[in-house]
Amino acid sequence: MKGLILSGGTGTRLRPLTFTSAKQLLPVANRPILCFAIDALRDVGIHDIGIVVGTTAPEVKNTLGDGSSFGIQVTYLHQSEPLGLAHAVSLARPFLGEEPFVMMLGDNVIHGGFQHAMKQFMQTRVDALVLTGPVDDPQHFGIVQLQGDRIVRLVEKPSRDLGNLALCGVYFFNPVIHAAIRAITPSPRGELEITDAVQWLVDHHFSVSHTVVTSWWKDTGRPNDLLEANRLLLEDLTPDIQGSIDHESVITGPIQVGSGTTIRKSTLRGPISIGHNVHIENAYIGPYTSIGDDVTIHGTDVEYSVILSGCIIDQAPRLDQCLLGRYVEIVRTTRNPRSVRMVLGDQSICEWS
């Protein structure tokens, strides 16, 4: 059985970070989101994985290579433009062949994996099985409507109340899905929707079932969701201190500190993940913060934030619920007159109080 991970798309909801990085490679708990999808497939015994890539293909390939370091074999499948999830499946057909497969969205995190779903799919031999979970904002998701335990309707991002049971981005398919995709037409937004293909299966009396996630799941396509996924993953943090912490610093709660990192005269309250070659001095780092490699933080409070590699934060105001891209600099100046000087990309957000 093969796996298929979708890692294309432009990540418009995460701009400006995604102007220079694939959304699936943004880190949560100091690890690229895409790696959690790979873990989930490998944990159900799938090692032959196709990854659909788009304009960010070079970055994805540089991160994953041939997959051997993850214990898998990777085949890259290029999608020239984002024409929908079902379109991605159709271009992957030569790789998938005529056998069942699991498809997963590369920017979704399924805590605890989906071994129970794999078991159900293999035992029931249905034509399609989708992983579902309740959400608070169903208008942002593909929604499943049930009649008893039977799926009767799937709607992508409904404009009216159709329930709150959302598709979690994991799909188990038999080869009949290829016939369904050939039969559908693009949606009003110009994409071949996987929900339409599954609906075709339902309408033509193929067996389609669902199972609910056993823990939590997150679509990390928006900044707040990425920060929340980071928080939830840090709840599972295993303490590991490889760097140097002086006797004047105060550490409470679980933290990870990478090699070459120095922490001086600071207070850290875990869970916190800190990368390699980081320097923290006269600072407070609060819970649910991930700090990438080669970051400097001096004289600043940081909490509930994700800070990517190479950032410099020097005597800045308190940072809370922040998502900082690579090589961001937030520094205090002594120039007069006092002012705020910024260089911000498209769709940046800056709040000051």
Image (spheres, grey):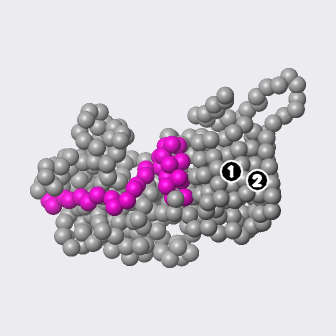
User: Could you tell me residue 261's position as x and y percent?
Assistant: 76, 63
Which amino acid is tagged 2?
Ser
Q: Nearer the viewer, residue 261 or 40?
A: 261
Q: Amino acid at mark 1?
A: Ile
Q: Residue at x 56, y 40 (%)?
A: 15
**Height in image: 320 above or below 31?**
above
* 219 in magenta: yes
Q: Are marks 1 and 2 in contact (CB under 8 Å)?
A: yes
Residue at 18% from the left image edge and 49% from the top image edge: 146
Residue drawn where x is 55% and y is 58% of the image: 234
Q: In the image shown, does 63 or 312 lie closer to the viewer?
A: 312
The residue stretch that appears in magenta: 206-234
The residue at which mark 1 appears reads as: 285
Q: Which residue is mark 2?
A: 266
* Circle on res. 192: none
Work out which residue is located at the far top of the displayed protein and give it: 337
Q: Secondary structure at mark 2?
A: loop
Q: Quadrant of the N terminus?
A: bottom left
Residue 141, image x, y percentages: 34, 44
**Which residue appears at 81% of the width and 58% of the height?**
248
